[in-house]
Image: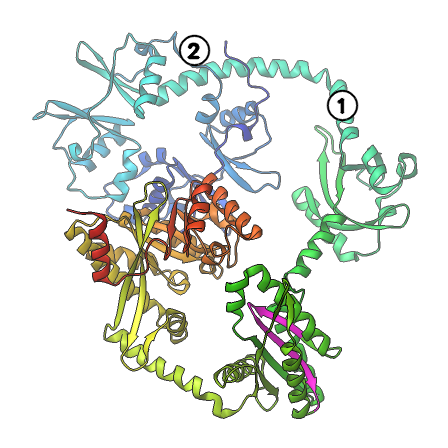
Amino acid sequence: MPKSSRYQKVCDVFTNKVISCVKHTHLIEAVRLMRAHNVSAIFVQEHRSICGIWTEADCMKLDFNNPQIKSVEIASVMSSPVISISSQRLLSDAALVFHQYSVRHLLVTDESALPCGVISITDIVRNQGLDHYLQFRPVNEQYSKNISIVPANMGVSEAVKLMYERNEKVILVFNKRQNEHGIITQRDLLHLIIEHESKHFCWDFASWPLYQISPKNSLFDAYRLMSDNNVRHLVVTDTQEIKGVLSLEHLINEIESAYCSELEKVLAQRDIALQHSQRNLYLANKIIDASLDGIMITQQDGVIIQVNPAFTTLTGYQEYEVIGKQPKILSSGKHGKSFYIKMWQSIADKGVWQGEICNRKKNGDLYTEWLSIIQIREPNCSEVVYAAIFSDITERKNAEEKIVQLAYFDELTGLPNRRLFNDRLSMALAAAHRNNDMLAVMFIDLDRFKEINDSLGHSAGDELLKMVAKRLQALLCEGDTLARLGGDEFVVLCEVDNIASVISLADQILNHLNIPFQLEGLEVGATASIGAAIYPEDGLDSETLLKHADIAMYRSKEIGRNSFQLFKSSMNARSLERLAMMSRFQHALENDEFELYFQPKQCLKTQTIKGVEALLRWYDPTLGMISPAQFIPLAEELGLIVKLDLWVLNNAGMQLALWQQKGIKAGRLAVNVSACHLSQGKLSKSVEQMLKRYNLSGDCLEIELTESSFISSFSQAKKQLQQLKKMDVHIALDDFGTGYSALSYLTKLPIDTLKIDASFIAKIPDEYGNSEVVAAIIAMATSLNLCVVAEGVEKQTQYNYLQSLGCDVIQGYYYCRPLAQRQWFEFYAQLTPA
């Protein structure tokens, strides 16, 4: 007999996927959902609770002559209530439930009684190791002999009616012209719901050719034939004469019969096992004593009846000091009455509570613990006990607080970062408004800092920034705030009495920065351009003050740097220039004045082209060449970014069609799209329309997105990307590591490629930190089967280092600059001589 599975649990074999829909869902939508997830049952929800189930076997109960069958609500044909079982129950318990309720699917719930999966009778019997039992059972004893055979030209609806009347789960179809038999099964009826057209003939709907087996073969032979060919039905033939149909259900029923016999033995063995309960209790106590987590068990009235050695280690109380007492002996007094009311309400409702709680040790020290309280009802007894399991997480909490602190300070200089500065500015403005005070916001930007980075290296540049931060801090008064916003940009917030004090502070800053810095044995000068805005004269809110200080700082740069400027309304020239650009942008978009450039990428293994990125360029007759860094934010501000995306997509499609016409095979064309396009839920539709317009396969297109695209609406982004993947469009994550990096995106989203930002590549292989980050990204991507593209590769040393790390693809000036269309065709022609 087969090996007993009495120790197997539901969680060992169940499917951890619950596919559900609301009760008002039309039948056709429910069927599409089932087919999309390849399941045979769908659960029905009402107010977020499971209220019913509908399976493919229920197709037989439908009236397919009903023209409104597609719009039938699932609630009207579902079975209710849904029988559930805990994932921790034994398989033998599940088998008894199946037998008791005569169902074939059970909803599986987790320890919190929440749905976590589904188990079918098939899942159980397939895990019993009874295959050898099938070897001794011939096909002749099991198959259905009276199977209807209908002509190929019979209408599908008529055939379904025949199946319904005869209560048959399959029907054979004979095509006289082809002298071939086909089959229509119960599962095929799901497809009929979606394609509910009376004009279909049976042959159009049937599956063929059929797999055949002799009645003399064993059921194991049949099972292997079904598994190898992924079918559920075999035609039983004897000397080429059809005798009937053998289905997978016949095999399952046969295994069920053997399993029930095994189950009877298991139950008998369980009775014997009950006699050893004292021994099991002894083992359980040993496990409790060995646990590293503190464990305390109390009676229903709260009296402590047992603790383990870890309890003593964590609290300082010996066993004799707490047995017979109440758990309040550990109370810290930090939690109010409402806290404990909610805790016990959760235990009463769900049988469990988990959370953080602050308690007190015997020596008086407070500590934070992660506590789980479980309600335990003894079998055949009304007595209730509670088990409290806890661990000391004080050190982890302290570490989390340090991490939160780091989120508000710049890692390099230790100064407040942009987030903390904005918080302080908001509070300072509120206080200044109440007290009628004057505030100054000063932007400080180092002049030609890039030259220092380029000539001395980024490590020297970082050291200079730290020195500058120290000098600036030394000049400020207590209560003033100096923050680093990023790069070489600092900002100061200070309370002032008059304009003269602002000018005086700016002069001190300029004078102190003019004193050379000792950097790697060299004297390095670092001048700055400073701009300031005053509250309330130059603005009443944070945004306005920062904007006006920024305008004043840029004015300082325009007049020669190493200077200070207070904001004046006349400085709006920059704003007017921006306004002119805004009006020209709308005109340029409407008159097709943009142009696509193309930058090819190189495969490091084959040294061949591995795709091309489309880059948008705008040359205005009046304003000249305008950087994407200027007009793309402008497009976002004007609400035209999606329209600009559509222009790029359409022209990318035109180029791909042209490439196909010219026989150019350069891999996928990558197109950057905005976060707005993704969050609006229009991206997949836009791509689909473009592909259809130019008769293109989705495999020739790659969509590049930044990590910020997923922040506003993760679920919407995931849905859009999944729809793109269905069209075979590839997804690339651009500027990886520079934005809101969350590694969970790599597993939750269908991403194909990671593009390492050029800021990392620029510092390799010389800078240890950046080099290690790049190596880690490549290793991680390789383990996740993601392609890696290194952006901004400009030097041979970078190329060699990336090749040694196993990077897949490079992009940058080292291989090729962005090219206009004609230049791109010439470049490709040189690589592929006739």
The amino acid type of the residue labelled 2 equals His
Residue at coordinates 61% horizontally, 76% vertically from top-left?
491
Can you identify the residue that label 1 sits on?
Answer: 281
Marks 1 and 2, how far apart at CA: 38 Å
Numbered-mark total: 2
Residue 237 versus residue 603 in the image, above or below: above
- With 233 as the anchor, is 254 left or right in this view? right
Secondary structure under tag 1 reads: helix
The location of residue 831, given as percent across then percent down, is 23, 49
The amino acid type of the residue labelled 1 equals Leu
Residue at coordinates 51% horizontally, 55% vertically from top-left?
763
Question: Magenta residues?
Answer: 482-497
Place residue 531 in its image quadrant: bottom right
Task: Give whichever of 319, 659 is nearer the camera.
Answer: 659
Place residue 631 in its image quadrant: bottom left
Q: How is the image coloured?
A: rainbow
**Upstream in the sequence, badge 1 or badge 2?**
2
Q: Is residue 26 visible?
A: no
Can you identify the residue that label 2 sits on?
Answer: 132
Residue 214 versus residue 549 in the image, above or below: above
- With 529 as the anchor, is 515 left or right in this view? right
Is residue 488 in the magenta section? yes
The location of residue 253, given as percent across then percent down, is 40, 19
Given contact means CB atoms under 8 Å apart, are the residues at marks 1 and 2 in contact?
no
Secondary structure under tag 2 reads: helix
Q: Residues within 10 Å of mark 2 (few under 14, many from 20)?
A: few
The location of residue 272, given as percent across then percent down, is 67, 13
Task: Give whichever of 618, 130 is nearer the camera.
Answer: 618
